[in-house]
Amino acid sequence: MNLFNRRQSLTLLGAAVLVPSVTPTWAQGTPTSPTTLTPFWPETLRAARGQTVYFNAWAGSERINAYLQWVSGELQRDFGVKLQHVKISDAADVVKRVRAEKQAGRKDTEGTVDLIWINGENFAAMKRDALLSAPFAPTLPNFQWVDTVGKPTTLVDFSVPTDGLESPWGMAQLTFFADAKRLPQLPQSMNELLALARSQPGRITYPRPPNFHGTTFVKQALIEHAPDVKALAQPVTAAALEAQAAPLWRFLDALHPHLWRGGKQFPQNSAAQRQMMADGELLLALTFNPNEAANEIAAKRLSAAVQSWQFAKGTIGNTHFVAIPYNAPSKAGAQVVANFLLSPAAQARKADIDVWGDPTVLDVARLPAAERARFASAMRPGQLAQSAPALPEPHASWVDALEKEWTRRYGV
């Protein structure tokens, strides 16, 4: 997520709002047919009222933090559930904490985490080590609107089946952006990017792995050069790494001498790379949020001439999720939170460029007209004009193997 592999801090954020005596009809079930509720959902709503849900979520974005503040108020008002945003910088630290609690014999209601923002190798680790609660996602009333056909990564997380253990929250896909005045011809593959770097030495780079965006850049190059892409969907082995990644290292060996500072140094993260592009030092930047450039233009941090694009044959895409640990004290409340996060109202607000700009996991075309209208908006400067195919992530086990080998070869 991946996007949420950051180090941890434990600042808490919460809001208390008066609780109404009646839960809104749409919140009781689905926007069109409350009678289709899963049989136990009313019981879940009753059990959740009065609970506090400790949501461990990355806090590196003011927009995301503000969005969660809004979510907190809605949940308190409509469901009597208090959401505490436990601000973290690395989901891996939360996984370690839950694992330590299990090793210490904590029972299934004695944990410190009710809900976690997660995907990729962190989900794979929690699933493998039985650190997650029982499957819950398909039983959420709003799960019926998830686009599991057009967005298959809502059911498969880095080639690991979710099996209902985590609920989809948002979509992500590797996207590049550049000032069209400085870069009128946009590279459409890694090989075209190499050609651009050769013609414009020192004007291209990528974040340093294990930063998530840097690792994603490396995985994109791996997918484009691997002899057998299907092998990447399987757990990594030493033999598979040697066979499939050999062309990747040859590509990076050819690319690095033409990068910023000769490929001897790399930006620490995508925000640093974006600023270098805004300052004219670099020709392009990358993101995993297709709406990031539009967000930055709206905030007047990027020129309105910046445009976003994805490679013609596709770029890596995935879904980020929320999951409930095995020992969450407020499991009912956590399910209510997850269901609200899937509601058209919450998904549309999250997708709004002025709020967050995180793409929805819902099949908007299937929503009732009133709910579908929430997503209607005019194209904004910098917004992705046309999406390319989303390429599946390699199996989660490839992340650590690639990062270690990259560090061995280029990290010193």
Image (tube, rainbow, N blue to C red):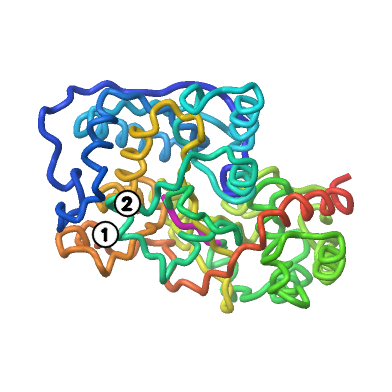
For the point 49% across and 22% down, the residue is 110
The relative height of residue 321 versus residue 152 in the rendered view (above or below) is above
Q: Main secondary structure of the magenta part?
A: strand
Q: Which mark is residue 375?
A: 1
User: Real-space Cα distance between discs 1 and 2?
Assistant: 9 Å
For the point 46% across and 57% down, the residue is 171
Q: Is residue 171 magenta?
A: yes
- Alpha-carbon neighbours of circle 2 within 10 Å: few (<14), some, or many (≥20)? many
Give the quadrant of residue 32.
bottom left
Q: Is residue 74 magenta?
A: no
The relative height of residue 83 versus residue 140 in the rendered view (above or below) is above
**First along the sequence among labels 1 and 2:** 2
The answer to whether residue 177 of the structure is visible from this angle is no
What amino acid is at disc 2? Gln
The answer to whether residue 44 of the structure is visible from this angle is yes
For the point 71% across and 53% down, the residue is 399
Q: Residue 296's x, y, as percent?
A: 45, 50
Mark 1 or 2: in front is: 2
Q: Nearer the viewer, residue 144 or 103?
A: 103
The relative height of residue 122 versus residue 372 in the rendered view (above or below) is above
Q: Residue 155's x, y, as percent?
A: 48, 60
Q: Residue 176's x, y, as percent?
A: 57, 63
Q: Nearer the viewer, residue 150 or 189?
A: 150
Q: Which residues are magenta?
A: 169-173
Does residue 253 appear left or right of residue 136 in this picture? right
Q: Residue 160's x, y, as percent?
A: 59, 58
Q: Which residue is mark 2?
A: 347
For the point 43% across and 59% down, the residue is 304
